[in-house]
Amino acid sequence: ELLKQIADESEDLSNEAFPFMGAREVALRGGIRARLFRISFSGEMAFEISVPARYGDALVRNLMLAGKQFGVTPYGTE
């Protein structure tokens, strides 16, 4: 649901259209192109997003804003 908030409305992110271990280029709102990977090492439905470095900070900020309604929190081991 969070990705639907930042992805272009034309992107189908359903389980059927984007299976586990799937990867493809997607459009984010605002016209930014990103690589989206459906990868999970902990069992939940999870994605990794790759954007050009100059968009990284904006992506994280937009994810956090869009994710407030879902109680999003940063996650990682780095």
Image (spheres, rainbow, N blue to C red):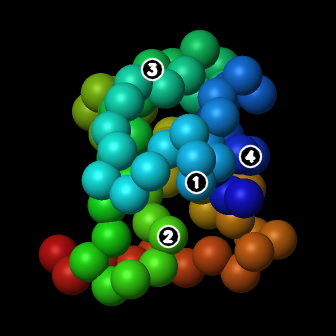
Where residue 41 appears, as percent x and y from the top left, is 26, 77
Q: Which residue is mark 3?
A: 33
Front residue of 11/33: it is 11
Element on which disc 3 rests: strand
Query: Which numbered disc flags the more N-terminal residue, 4 or 1?
Result: 4
Q: Which residue is mark 1?
A: 15
| Residue depth check, mark 2 versus mark 1: number of the one nearer the observer | 1
Say which residue appears at 29% left-offset and 27% top-offset: 52
Question: Does the CB distance between marks 2 and 1 fall below 8 Å?
Answer: yes
Question: Does the CB distance between marks 3 and 2 fall below 8 Å?
Answer: no
What amino acid is found at the position of numbered circle 4 in the picture?
Gln
What amino acid is found at the position of numbered circle 1 in the picture?
Asn
Q: Which residue is mark 4?
A: 5
Q: CA distance from mark 4 to mark 3?
A: 15 Å
The residue positioned farthest toward the front in the image shown: 16
Where residue 70 appears, as percent x and y from the top left, is 75, 74
Q: CA distance from mark 3 to mark 2?
A: 22 Å
